[in-house]
Amino acid sequence: MSGEPVRRLEHGELPADTVSLARFLIGKIVVRELPEGVLGGRIAETEAYLPGDAACHAFRARTPRNRSLFLAPGHAYVYIAYGTSFMLNVSSEAAGIGAGVLIRALAPLEGVALMQRHRGVTRLLDLARGPGRLAAALRIDLGLDGIDLCGAGPLWLGTDGWDGGEIGESIRIGITRDADRVLRFYLRGNPFVSGPKRLNR
DNA sequence: AGTGCGATTGACT
DNA sequence: GTCAATCGCACTA
């Protein structure tokens, strides 16, 4: 789509605030390195969870679960939603400030066969459309909580220089507190974006 | 200590 | 469209 090889993003390239990071990450790439192979996909959808935002897991005190949200920008915050699904977030504010960006959907680019095995489905559209599906496809679990996504670890953020997508905005999906804030971003018209149609125009 | 509720998904009517 | 699964954590007492 762009021709450039995928390279790792560096900390210094990440925007310094949560909303800017949520927009910046659209079109970037998540890479997962496993002994069985390399998995990758283009980020099609994100949501911002801000300081002072009642929907943010860091809204209350720091706990063992949410501590990764307080790390410097570019670290993974992984947690279990509804006791069933893992969610991948990127910490987004200066160290000590709890905030993050939820990665909600990927357009698979590499390692499709392995993603299919992880997910138990074959349809490309269903592999990583939705945050829980995305984590399952990439085999992301609590063992990755707190790792540096701009480091040398097995899960990292990259770019291939692609910058062609129009970014749409909407309210966030599946929350009840601070539910009317426009903090969801997605690649307009991309079939790998999750969520109801009315939010994807 | 007990209760209620999610940043979801998949199965089912 | 409805609904259960499943568990960490906030909240009440």
Image (cartoon, coloured by chain):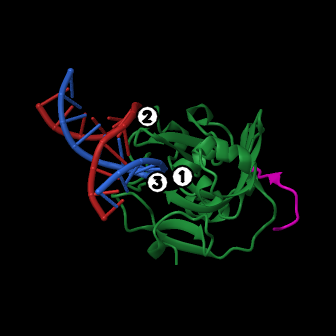
Chain colours: A green, B blue, C red
Query: What whole-number distance in Å separates the C-alpha atoms at marks 3 and 2?
Result: 15 Å
Tell which tag, 3 or 2, sits nearer the viewer. Answer: 2
- The kind of residue tagged 1 is Pro
- The vertical placement of A190 against C12, above or below, is below
Q: Position of residue A131 (x, y in %)?
A: 54, 52
Q: Position of residue A45 (x, y in %)?
A: 58, 62
Q: Nearer the viewer, residue B8 or A45?
A: B8
The secondary structure type at the circle numbered 2 is loop
- The kind of residue tagged 2 is Thr
Neighbours of disc 3 within 10 Å: few (<14), some (14-19), many (20+): some
Q: Which residue is mark 2?
A: A63
Q: Which residue is mark 3?
A: A51
- The kind of residue tagged 3 is Pro
Q: Are marks 3 and 1 on the same chain?
A: yes
Tell which tag, 1 or 2, sits nearer the viewer. Answer: 1
Q: Quadrant of residue A108?
A: bottom right
What chain does mark 2 sit on?
Answer: A
- The vertical placement of A175 against A61, above or below, is below
Look at the image and tell me whether residue A142 can be seen: yes
**Which image quarter is the N terminus of chain A in?**
bottom right
User: What residue span does the magenta drawing correspond to?
Assistant: A1-10
The residue drawn where x is 41% and y is 55% is A52
Neighbours of disc 1 within 10 Å: few (<14), some (14-19), many (20+): many
Look at the image and tell me whether residue A16 can be seen: no
Q: Main secondary structure of the magenta part?
A: loop
Q: Which residue is mark 1?
A: A131
- Asked if residue A104 lies left or right of residue A175, the reply is right
Q: Position of residue A51 (x, y in %)?
A: 46, 54
